[in-house]
């Protein structure tokens, strides 16, 4: 299995790791130990001691880094051995480290061999400007390949069938989407006029089923970060009178068959209503956990481990975004594989970039 | 793994699918969606949408068929797409369908490529004529290859050792069976005179251990339907004075290592005694669930996934029926495989016959 | 996967099998049925009937041996068929038997084809001379390859990091061990003077942290039996004034990824204090179950099924014993494999030696 590696993935929400705490999590098939020092600094190492292969995450944090709980070797945040009770601090005594960067409430990790490039970190400024009472976020460990979770967002027509009581109102199905592609991403836009909003947005706008103008945009960035804007207003009224939900959906493969799913939601109405915020967050969590997740897990199971294209899916216009994203991922994986082969062979023990 | 495919298997008991309900069940490694329309009509489709491979069973029944719960495509009972909100009803947009037929309280399914042949449906008329108070049936999902469950019935000498407190009385072991074979099946008959009945039949006949004449016949039909007649009478008395149990044992492979086991029981005594019927059914269910099933599952596990013949079993006279059935299945699988290769190549999307 | 086969493994503690009882346990990937006759005699057979492969352990013990619960075949302790209700006692009708021998409270089993050699049974006389109030033993079914459990004892420096609140005091890390090897085993000795004992031994000796002289010796015998002596005395005092713990650690592979772990403890202080003995045993059990076992299981998982050497461990002086034992096991396995190929081909049905 291949993944895009030279790219930013969300490893965890920032508040999942308090100062002085560790978090062990498998990312792209690699067991990773994340920790935050008392001064807030983050570090990420391959979660395996090079001595006899105990997980470092079973050890403890010390001032200088992490100490293996089995035989006491210590490593700093760059993977250098800084304490060896049993011999010298040989240069070979290293653990692979990964660059991490905290932004937009999230801890981002770069798993590839190439130099981590902060300029490619997705811009999720909408998260930073949202007041706490108009912001919620969550995490779900999910079964199924991560691409199914991307497919699910890139083709929002599913809302009309899977979420008819909350998000779907039929407009996504009736509206032709515009798909655009650039170097780093794929965007898809649905613009609908005089259409039906889903029950939730209809209630927020007090439309009682009256027609609305609706805009929905998904911006997918390599390898799996999606910003979703969904907004509506009474038909014919200017867009600034309407309401927007601006959400994040981000996937990080754990293994070929399991996915870390991160999501966050902001909005442009009831900005300071904490009770509304909580209810809104709970509803979103419930929809994903009881409607999307079971469907995607079942879809994954039904394919029995076979490749998407091998099963010859019969695709429609609604799948344009899905196809573009899948092709872009495949192309990028081929690109990285070729680059890796000709330019930067992976060292036996990788160094921190 | 190969199975006999051009043959009738029980997919479910008829009352397992009420009008307007669906049942998802894997048969011969294929996920199948069964449903019954409000008018009673049955249908069976490959339980996988050809669009993005969601299980159709997560959708809902509509008047015209089943609607996928993910993106709303609808298919009728023959697998034709009858509703596509995202494009035309292209001919390619089909799901494989299977012929089903309801008879003898059971829903029979034909999984192969050849035309379903009703003339080969096993005759289980004994089930139809039994009054409700002399009939019981059941279903058990069981671990282990389906052939072990057939072996178990084709060699009833096991009753003397596995069921000494209920069915076995020693007579099966002491009686040489006669095995006969025809085009579609194998029959095995044990005729014992002046012998010991098992405790259950002894009690029914009030013999208190007095000798009996006993007849036991198993008629196995391809691929896994067995009619079992077990009867007895006080030694020397005419057979029509005795009691018969006429039972069905039917196996349908779910996967190479799991089996759908269907059973039914009728009898020729106490025909209208509902309490006796219930007690009788409970006893049978208990025997199978706590004596046969654990032994067969352990036998399957002990073989560690290796083939029966590869382990070089040491067989006796009691295994004649077992061997005949296994050979007949192997021969039929080879026959179908050869036929398939030369005569009827499987289409990409199979049509309903 | 290969194991050393012509050697003694502990199959069970003696009191795990009462007279007239059976015990089914997989050893070296082989399902084994152990039983003890009413007269105390032990037997061990391959736990699979040669007829249709039911586990014999689902049958029952009779006077002459074990009777299969499926079709009634009986086998004696040497695997000879002594009862066949369905045919003659053919010579081919045999089950592989294994030599077992009870000593030092344990039931030892010889799984190889070569003649069992009692002269190679490890000498654990210290177990026999311990009074009941200074003896305890236990068994734990553990995840992970058995060699990790041997590694754990051959490198006791781990106690300083994994067990700092009980056994470890830092001395093991600071002391260079002497490793010796002979035909059948590897010995490792740590001798420390003027050093810190771990908290438990410190308390037993009432040292309150005062320096001690410490001796620790592990004698490993092929294939996985370790006698561990750990003792201490106030620094400068003669050794006979001190206290010794003499323990057994023995591993028997169940499968490549699971291990039977047997342990026993004796001591030379408070010999007749039953309460102390119980507390001591409970503490040891807790340490192993909550500190060693989780670490070793995590280590095993982290290696993802890959071989120890393939992962290129970075080893230190503390690993001398580990390396010697691993090399000796590998050498012995190669030796047995070569011998088997040239001298004693395995018969289809092995005979009891």
Image (cartoon, coloured by chain):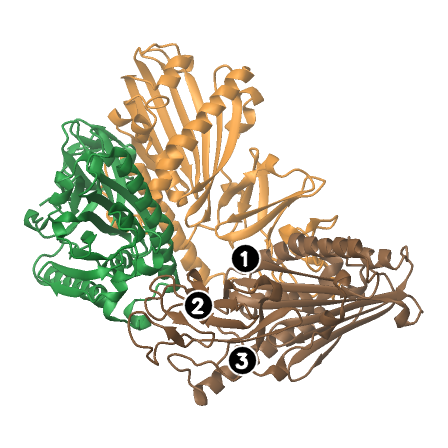
Chain colours: A orange, B green, C brown
Q: Which of the 4 image quadrants contains residue A212?
A: top left
Residue that lies at the very extreme toward the left in this rendered image: B119
Name the secondary structure under disc 3: loop
Q: Percent x, y for residue B9?
A: 18, 49
User: In this figure, which residue is indicated by the disc labeled 3?
Assistant: C6
Residues flagged by tags 2 and 3 on a common chain: yes
In this rendering, is residue B281 above or below B74?
A: below
Q: Name the residue nearer the viewer: B59 or B137.
A: B137
Residue pictured at 29% horizontal, 21% vertical: A192
Residue pictured at 51% horizontal, 72% vertical: C43
> Circle 3: is it few (<14), some (14-19), or many (20+) Cα within 10 Å?
many
Q: Earlier in the sequence, mark 2 or mark 3?
A: 3
- Tell which subunit mark 1 falls on: C
Q: Earlier in the sequence, mark 3 or mark 1?
A: 3
Mark 1 to mark 2 CA distance (whole Å): 39 Å
Q: Percent x, y for residue C334?
A: 52, 81
User: In this figure, which residue is indicated by the disc labeled 2?
Assistant: C66
- Please state, as top left, top right, bottom left or bottom right, where the N terminus of chain A lies in the image: bottom left
In this rendering, is residue A134 above or below B233?
A: above
Name the secondary structure under disc 1: helix
Q: Earlier in the sequence, mark 1 or mark 2?
A: 2
Q: Is residue A279 visible?
A: yes
Q: Name the residue nearer the viewer: C30 or C220.
A: C30
Q: Percent x, y for residue C339?
A: 49, 87
User: In this figure, which residue is indicated by the disc labeled 1?
Assistant: C301
Q: Which of the 4 image quadrants contains residue C198?
A: bottom right
Q: Which of the 4 image quadrants contains residue A100?
A: top right
> Circle 2: is it few (<14), some (14-19), or many (20+) Cα within 10 Å?
many
> Circle 1: is it few (<14), some (14-19), or many (20+) Cα within 10 Å?
some
In this rendering, is residue B341 above or below A60?
A: below
């Amino acid at each position: 299995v291949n993944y895009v590696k030279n790219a930013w993935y969300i490893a965890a929400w920032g508040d999942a790791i308090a100062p002085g705490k560790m978090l062990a999590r498998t990312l792209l098939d690699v067991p990773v130990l994340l920790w935050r020092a008392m001064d807030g600094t983050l570090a990420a190492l391959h979660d395996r001691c090079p001595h006899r292969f105990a997980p470092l995450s079973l050890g403890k944090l010390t001032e200088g880094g992490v100490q293996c709980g089995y035989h006491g070797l210590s490593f700093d945040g760059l993977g250098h051995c800084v304490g060896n009770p049993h011999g010298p601090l040989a240069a070979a005594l290293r653990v692979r480290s990964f660059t991490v960067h905290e932004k937009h409430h999230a801890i981002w990790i770069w798993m590839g061999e190439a130099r981590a490039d902060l300029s490619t970190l997705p811009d999720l400024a909408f998260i930073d400007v949202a007041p706490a009472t108009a912001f919620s976020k969550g995490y779900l460990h999910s079964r199924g390949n991560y691409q199914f979770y991307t497919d699910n967002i890139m083709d929002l027509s599913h809302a009309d069938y899977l979420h008819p009581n909350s998000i779907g109102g039929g407009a996504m199905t009736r509206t032709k989407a515009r798909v655009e592609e650039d170097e780093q991403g794929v965007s898809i836009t649905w613009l609908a006029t005089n259409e039906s909003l889903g029950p939730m947005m209809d209630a927020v706008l007090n439309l009682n089923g009256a027609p609305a103008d609706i805009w929905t945009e998904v911006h997918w960035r390599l390898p799996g970060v999606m910003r979703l804007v969904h907004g509506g207003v009474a038909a014919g009224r200017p867009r600034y009178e309407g309401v927007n939900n601006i959400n994040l959906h981000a996937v990080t493969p754990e293994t070929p068959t399991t996915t870390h799913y991160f999501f966050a939601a902001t909005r442009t109405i009831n900005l300071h209503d904490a009770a509304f915020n909580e209810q809104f967050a709970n509803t979103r969590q419930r929809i994903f956990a009881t409607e999307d997740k079971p469907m995607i897990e079942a879809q994954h199971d039904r394919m029995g481990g076979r490749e998407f294209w091998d099963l010859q899916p019969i695709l429609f216009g609604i799948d344009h975004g899905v196809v573009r994203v899948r092709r872009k991922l495949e192309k990028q994986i081929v690109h990285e594989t070729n680059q890796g082969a000709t330019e930067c062979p992976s060292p036996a023990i990788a160094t921190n970039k």
